[in-house]
Image (cartoon, rainbow, N blue to C red):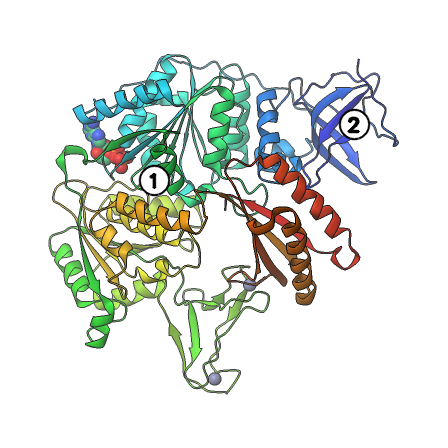
Amino acid sequence: MPRYVDVILPLPLRETFTYELQPQCPTLPQVGSRVLVPLGNTKTYTGIVVRLHDEKPTYATKLVLEVPDEQPVVLPGQLRFWHWIADYYLCSLGDVYKAALPGTLKKVPAKPSAAKALPARETGDTRPGFPLTEVQQRAMEDIEEQWQRHNVCLLHGVTSSGKTEIYIHLMQKAIEEGKQVLFMLPEIVLTAQLTERLRRVFGDRLGVYHSRHTDRQRVELYRRMLSDAPCDIVVGVRSSIFLPFRRLGLLIIDEEHETSFKQQDPAPRYHARNAALVLAAQHGAKALLGSATPSLESYHNALCGKYGLVTLRTRFAGMQLPDIEVVDAQEMQRKKMMTGIFTPQLLAHIRHALEQRKQVILFQNRRGYAPVMECRECGWTPRCQQCDVSLTVHRSLSRMVCHYCGAVYDIPTVCPNCQGRDLSSRGYGTERIEQQLQRILPEARIARMDLDTTRSRQSYEQILHDFEQGHTDILIGTQMVTKGLDFDNVSLVGILSADQMLAQPDFRSYERAFQLMEQVAGRAGRKGERGHVLLQTRDAGNDIVHQVVAHDYEGMYRQQAEERELFHYPPFCRVVFVYLKHRNESVVESLAADMAALMRQIFGQRVLGPDTPPVGRVQLMHIRKLILKVELTAPMSAVRQRLLALQTQILGMKPYRAAQIYYDVDH
Ligand code: ADP
Ligand code: ZN
Ligand code: ZN
């Protein structure tokens, strides 16, 4: 019997820890087993065993307190995957462990939990989906043919072309062959509408893994996946890549372009699409990426032959893509014809749709009442005390909120700078738009869908249910209304302002603006008559606006790809954002300068910055950013080693001890 175990603890520490096994330990842990271990004088943690051995460490080891389960909870394949995540995304194994296991599996169990026997499951109760149309059938055969030569295939199919039906047929085939399927979606698309559609076909061979599920539900699914009667299909969000699969044979990622697949905070800052493709490769599984507006990365990979490509150009049942009308908001403003944010054209179309008993979706990518409050006399605007950002007014809360740290403030009635009383709101959030529209159309039944109205899963599903049942005429929302929704009766979509999306200081902002607008347009006219979209903008000459009007994805791709290649941005290189944080601004300044100099010694011209990000201080921490651009062919492990060595060197310098450095790979 080995004497020692190396374990990962749920802490942002790079190393593993070694503990000694009690000689009379009743259960011998294995690689992947949970063990209860002490740390320091008072703390007990649940660790994951990664190695058993007899090598006595140079320091005094503590004893493993308990081995709570008979069987490992993490499979060897998962550990391999954890290592890849930690390596590639420059974080610790502890960070990965924290993200990978649902809450209570990481907690110290009150008493040893015997692995529960799960009820035997019927595997007969799948029903066929809709028969595919000829076009869909051909697309499916093309995908299978592409899989002969490529492990990954991109399905570029316009909105409502029936991609979901094709997925269902592919999943059916895979499980008949005894394979497991992982079907991934961005958080917000995983609605009751879709899960019901899948459950009707797959019954309880389907498991759903969602961050809005309770921890108990997630632990239950995790344990079921470990059992000898696991789900054949898991539909899940980002974190579903961490479930224990033993025979993963097919990976499908819908809405693969969605930026929410990228985890921002905390570490691991992984990109779930890219990580899932690595997972699939480790399992020897085939992968399908689907989107009406593919990411530049995936489309590039398809064009250069790394992925297969299958295209669906027509909507199901011969429906036409919506026609898109651009309205010049600047001109309307000059002519003093605006009612708040609404052009007369949009209001006329809304009225017409309501008269026809049709429904309307209005999209504005900004929540709250107004993004800025301003004193008309001296120009003062309220800002967060902890972050360098102006506060968003929320009338429903009668408060101002910082969207970066969540701090809440009273709305002033008097300007603290000049004592003036003329404080006005500038800009439009969804809340203000709802209020304005209700005043203009008092009879209309209006609902709002944004982060503020959907805090609970019920409220989110309720809003969608009411809209689906026709209890709501107009749905106003943020990007939440752009995705995946399949309603029959929507004849009009209004994009209230394209401008703010186009003005984002990010190299992806044009791509993203195109995707959001094309996707929200895709909600119109899915059944019945052709849909209509009104796009309000003060920048009617912008190429992106023309490309949305023409549904010209390829044109958008060509133009954006050309610029990215010219200025060295993904998909033509990899970017690693290096963030440096400190409470003291002059310290972070010199830290960033020193780090930049050291990085330039190694990476030369590949280093950009330091810069102050658009919001240069969050929660009292001053932030600076460096960008490292790495050739696609460069070995990431070497880059990682050098960055981490630099980090150790620089954080070892006295003035920088309290600083934080972290990385965002493939931002
Ligand atoms: P996408 O995923 O490409 O946006 P969906 O799969 O949601 O498209 O299909 C759009 C609509 O058309 C859905 O309501 C779907 O049920 C219907 N549909 C698509 N293909 C078929 C089919 N072969 N038979 C019947 N209905 C279909
Ligand atoms: Zn703040
Ligand atoms: Zn003032």
Percent coordinates x, y for residue 6 in the rendering:
75, 27
Could you tell me the amino acid type at mark 1? Answer: Pro
Q: Is residue 257 left or right of residue 101?
A: left
Residue 302: mark: none
Foreground: 632 or 473? Answer: 632
Please tell me whether residue 127 is drawn above or below residue 58 in the rendered image: above
Residue 137: quarter of image: top left
Residue 345, above or below 214: below
Residue 644 appears left or right of 573: right
Q: Quadrant of ligand 2?
A: bottom right
Circle 1 residue:
294
Residue 215 percent across, percent down from the top left: 54, 36
71 or 150: nearer the eye? Answer: 150
Residue at the disc numbered 2? 65
Q: Which-is-in-front pick, marks 1 and 2?
A: 1
Q: Considering the image in quadrants, where does the N terminus appear?
A: top right
Q: Is residue 611 left or right of residue 51?
A: left
Does the closest atom of ligand 1 sit within 8 Å of the Cβ of label 1?
no
* The quadrant where residue 75 appears: top right
Q: What residue lies at 37% left-to-right and 41% top-to-bottom?
A: 295
